[in-house]
Amino acid sequence: MKKEKSKKVSSPQWADFTKYQTFERQCSNYSDYLNSYVNWFAKKSNVCRFAMKQGLFLAMFAGSLFCINKFEGNYESIELWLLISLPCLILTISLLPDFVTDRGVIKSKSNWCFIIIYFVPALLKILQLNWEACVIPLLGIGLGMTFIFYLINRLEGYTRAWSRYRTAQYKISLISCQKQTGLLTEKQALHRLHHVINSEVESRHKEIISDLHFFGDKVNGLLGKRAGL
């Protein structure tokens, strides 16, 4: 006989909260529901914020190279030193906060990708190639990453959703603690739980409409300016 495949337990669905349940059961279901979304949105939010931060530092690096290139004077002897020390300084500022809390951050493939990009001008200088030609592309990549991932994060609401679900999770934990210690009766606990659920739903819809209006206003404003030229 073939072994039956174990069914994957899915997260509670919204319809589960419209049925009458005891406080403990409904609180447990809603906590699982929130936890699944907190984890999902946290991953999306972290990717967007990481790309925004690295893009901003990359733009700062390219801007510094642009200033060095426009600087009038004879600094040929220290040019290579500047192209090596400047990336080290910016990488230290960029990665140090994460490195203090997580030593494994330096092993990240995405971080190594950016580390290599920072030292491209120095490599071109060592190979006696025109390193100035990569300044504008680096500046465009940095600003583009920051702008694009900011819009994606704002339009999709990754960070706002992660924060909203996590806040609801904290409120549910507090209500559960108050119920267990006898500060709240079953009826009072259910009332507060339903208030949190209702507030989360209302906040979610308001944020979705707000994000869509924000994106639409920016696009309409850009098209309006172009039409007026």
Image (cartoon, helix red, strand yellow):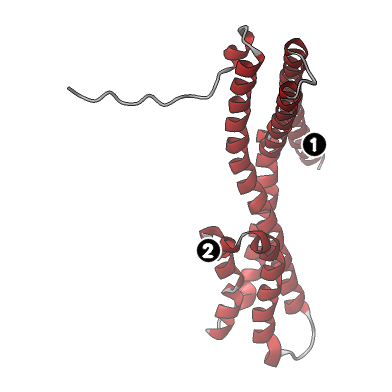
Query: In the image, what residue occupies the spot 55% across and 20% down?
Result: 12
The one of 226 and 149 positioned closer to us in this rendering: 149
Q: Can residue 212 be seen in this view?
A: no
Query: In the image, what residue occupies the spot 60% across and 79% down?
Result: 122
Q: In which quarter of the image is the C terminus?
A: top right
Q: With 185 as the anchor, is 48 left or right in this view?
A: left
The one of 57 and 33 positioned closer to us in this rendering: 33
Q: Quadrant of the N terminus?
A: top left
Residue 160: quarter of image? top right
Residue type of the residue flagged with mark 1: Gly
Residue 85: quarter of image? bottom right
Residue contact at pointers 2 and 1, CB within 8 angstroms: no
Seen as rendered, the residue at the extreme front is 182
Above or below residue 184? Residue 116 is: below
Binning the other alpha carbons within 10 Å of mark 1 as few (below 14), some (14 to 19) or many (20 upward) gives: few
Q: What element carries label 1?
A: helix
The residue that mark 1 highlights is 221
Residue type of the residue flagged with mark 2: Lys
Q: What element carries label 2?
A: helix
Q: Is residue 82 visible?
A: yes
Seen as rendered, the residue at the extreme top is 20
Query: In the image, what residue occupies the spot 67% across and 49% down?
Result: 49
Looking at the rendered image, the disc whose residue lies closer to the viewer, 2 or 1, is: 2
Give me the disc on residue 201.
none
Spot occupied by residue 219 in the image (x, y as percentages of width and height): 74, 36
Give me the disc on residue 107.
2
Spot occupied by residue 193 in the image (x, y as percentages of width and height): 73, 18
Spot occupied by residue 129 in the image (x, y as percentages of width and height): 56, 81
- The numbered mark, 2 or 1, whose residue comes first in the sequence reads 2
The one of 124 and 112 positioned closer to us in this rendering: 112
Above or below residue 63? Residue 197 is: above
Q: With 183 as the anchor, is 130 left or right in this view?
A: left
